[in-house]
Image: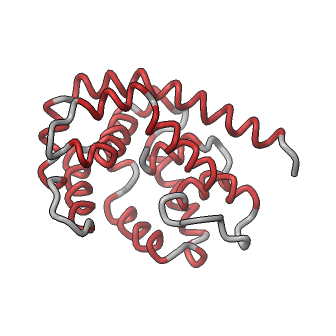
Amino acid sequence: MNHLAHALLAGDDDALRLGGMLGDFVRGAPDVAWPREVAEGIRLHRAIDVYTDAHPEVLAAKARLAPPYRRYAGILLDMWFDHCLARDFPRWSAVPLRPFSRDLRALLREREAQLPPPLQRFFAYMQTHDLPAGYAQPQVLGRALAGIGQRLQRANPLADALPVLQAQADVLDRHFEAFFPELQAFARGWIEQERMGPD
């Protein structure tokens, strides 16, 4: 899943939400300088990714993408699912998309000096493109895919992937709608179990 999903799945806890944003930008054990709740958010991010990668609906959606796009199906579906989530946000959140997006950027702004440099750079990109709310717009999604493609070392088709995703929108959206409620339940259960565990 991508940034909007990770932020939403963290619930109302700012520390978990911050950890959810950090999850793509840190490797190994979370820095001991971060509070325990932020480290929990990083671990939640990783648990969500593992659950997502093994889910039958996600595997079926990946299989819909033909070569050469199938090689990048993980990236493409992460981005398309955030587009689905942003586009239909009132179905999934009691908080409207734009205030949710502004609050997430405000959280990152408060901790900007402590963010790893890659996340600092991405935060600047978020501000420029009104992310994650901007993911609701196909043209923003297309630019984001092209940007990811440019950052990858090998040649790839990501800059041309948006029409491929749009052509399969109906079936990909059905996979998302079957998958996301189960992911929400998984994340809630993970958080409850973590909070019930020893300090």
**Residue 124 higher or lower than 100, as above or below:** below
What colour scheme does the image use?
secondary structure
Choose between 73 and 6: the one closer to the eye: 73
Choose between 10 and 59: the one closer to the eye: 59
Question: x, y percentage for residue 191?
Answer: 70, 39
**Residue 31 higher or lower than 113, as above or below:** above
Seen in the image, is 22 located left or right of residue 195? left
Q: What residue do we see at 83% from left, 38% from top? A: 196
Q: Quadrant of residue 94?
A: top right
Seen in the image, is 9 located left or right of residue 86? right
Q: What residue do we see at 60% from left, 69% from top? A: 110
Seen in the image, is 121 located left or right of residue 30? left
Choose between 199 and 83: the one closer to the eye: 199
**Residue 59 higher or lower than 131, as above or below:** above
Assign the N terminus to one quadrant of the image: top left
Question: x, y percentage for residue 20?
Answer: 56, 53
Q: What residue do we see at 45% from left, 30% from top? A: 55
- Outermost residue to the right: 198
Question: x, y percentage for residue 108?
Answer: 55, 64
Q: What residue do we see at 49% from left, 29% from top? A: 92
